[in-house]
Image: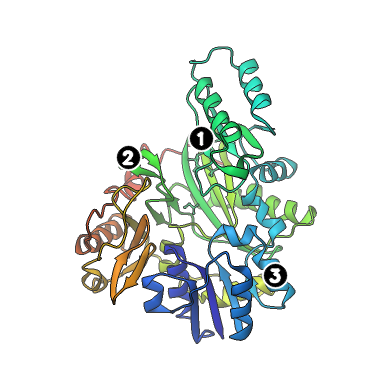
Amino acid sequence: MKVMVVGSNGREHALAWKLAQSALVDRVFVAPGNAGTAADAENVSISATDIAGLLAFAQENHVGLTVVGPEAPLCAGIVDAFQEAKLPIFGPARNAARLEGSKIFCKKLLRAADVPTADYQAFRDEESASQYMLDRYPNGTDPTPVVVKADGLAAGKGVIVCKTRDDALRAIARIAGEREFGSAGDELIIEERLDGQEASILAITDGRTIVTLPPAQDHKPAGDNDTGPNTGGMGAFSPTPLLDAATLDWVNEHVLVPTVHGLKRGRTPFTGVLYAGLMLTNQGPKVLEYNVRFGDPECQPLMMRLKSDLAELLLAAVEGRLDQIKPLEWDPRPAVCVVMASEGYPGPYKTAFPIRGLEEAAKLDDVQVFHAGTKIVDGNVVTGGGRVLGVTALGDSISAAKLQAYKAVKCIRWHGAWCRKDISDKALNPDAMRFRWKP
Ligand code: AMP
Ligand code: GLY
C-alpha cells in the first residue's frame, strides 16, 4: 500500500518514519515534507492546505491511506473531500474538527457532555466582553484569574493568560478590537484560569472504540523552568509519571468517552486523534483544550516507543474496526524529545543556515533525529523554520533518555541553534509531580 502524510513538521517526520516500517506499506509520500522526510520517505511538493492538489495526487497515485498531521487542512475539510472521492483518510471530518477549530464549539460540547473544564463565557464583540470584566472585577489591578481566548484557529497564539482585569481588557482589545488574530477573533471566550501541571492524553478513535496512548508532557514556554514566551512546544516525554493507571482510567471514563459520545450525539462523529490538553488541578483533571491531531512534539516520543504497526492501527480506525485490533505494544523504556530551534524563535528568525553533525547524532544508540523546519538546498540540509529538529531518544529511565537525547543534541550545530536544557526534568522534580488528587 502507498500512504501519504500531510504536513512538514517533526510530527509528520515521526509519522512517516513509523509508517515506513509497516509491513503493509511499500511507499510513503509526505506533502510537502522536509529534509528528514526526503530521506525516510518521498516528498511531494504540494502544500498541506492545497486540498484539491492533495486529492488529485492521491487519486493518480492510488494512495491507500492518507494521514493528516496539522489541524488547518482538517478544519478546512480535507477529510470530507477525500471521503467523497472514496479515498481512505485518517482524521476527523470538518464538523468534528471544530472541536479544535472553535473554542466555543468545544466548550459547549464539554458542558453538554459533563466533562470537567474551566467555567467560561462567550462574547461576540469587544464591548460586551469588556463590560463583563468591568462589572465582575471592579479593581483593574487586583489579581484576576482569567484567560482570554480567540474562538478560532490562531496557530496557538490566540490564548492570553491574564494576571489582572486590565490585562484581560487589553487581551480583549487585541482579539476583538485590533483583530490581531483576524477572523479567529470573530468571537472570544473568557475562561476561569486553572492551576496545576499540564499533561497531554492522546487517543485514537473510530467514533466508537477509544485506544488511549501513554500519557505525555509537552514544554510550551521557551525558557528553562517554564519561563519566557509560549512556543509550539520545546520538548516532550512519555510516559509521564504524573498520571497513574487509576487516573488514566478516570480520564478515559470522565473525559474521552463522554466527549466521543457527545460528538456522536451531536451528529459530528469523530474519527482520528483526540488529544486532550489537561490541567491536573486539585479538583482533578480538567480539559484545557482539545486538539484533533497528534501533538507536536508529543508524537515524536510516542512513535519512538510504539512497537505495533501504525498503518494497521490507523487503517482500523478509518474502517471502524478498532474494537478488533490487538492491544498496542510499547517499548517499556521512556522517550524524551528535545526541540532544537532557530535563534529568535518564537519571535522572528533567519533561516538557511547549514546544519552540521546530523550523521554523528544518528550513529548514537536509541536516537532518532526528527526534522521539523529543515530543507535541502544544493544538497545540504539547512534550517527552514523556527522549530528545526526534534532530537528523540529512548533510555532505561527518563533521566537516561534525557542524557542520550542531549548527547545527540551536542553533536548537532548551526548558527544560532538553541534548545531548552531541562526537558523532562519536571518528571524528576517531586514538586512538579505533586498531583495529590485521587480518583
Ligand atoms: P489552549 O490552546 O487552550 O490549550 O491554551 C494554550 C495554553 O494556554 C495551555 O497549554 C495552557 O498553558 C494555557 N491555558 C489555556 N487555558 C487555560 C486555563 N483555563 N487556565 C490556565 N492556563 C490555560
Ligand atoms: N504540543 C502542542 C500541540 O501540538 O499543539
Picture residue at 58% right of the left edge, 85% below the top: 61
Instruction: Report the amino acid beneath label 3.
Output: Ala
Colour setting: rainbow
Q: Is residue 242 visible?
A: yes
Mark 2 nearby-residue class (10 Å; few <14, some 14–19, many ≥20): some
Q: CA distance from mark 1 to mark 3?
A: 34 Å
Q: CA distance from mark 2 to mark 1?
A: 20 Å
Residue 272 location in percent, x, y? 62, 64
List the single residue furthest toward the top. Answer: 138
Picture residue at 74% right of the left edge, 60% below the top: 269
Q: Secondary structure at mark 1?
A: strand
Question: Of label 2 and label 1, which has the lower sequence position?
Answer: 1
Tags 2 and 1 touching, CB below 8 Å? no
Picture residue at 58% right of the left edge, 43% below the top: 182
Q: Secondary structure at mark 3?
A: helix
Q: Quadrant of the N terminus?
A: bottom right
Question: Of label 3 and label 2, which has the lower sequence position?
Answer: 3
Instruction: Report the amino acid beneath label 1.
Output: Ile
Which mark identifies residue 225? 2
Q: Point out the frontmost of discs 3 and 2.
A: 3
Q: Secondary structure at mark 2?
A: loop
Mark 3 nearby-residue class (10 Å; few <14, some 14–19, many ≥20): some
Q: Is residue 328 above or below residue 266?
A: below
Instruction: Report the amino acid beneath label 2.
Output: Asn
Tell whether 416 sits left or right of 45.
left
Mark 2 Cβ inside 8 Å of ligand 1: no
Q: Point out the frontmost of discs 1 and 3.
A: 3
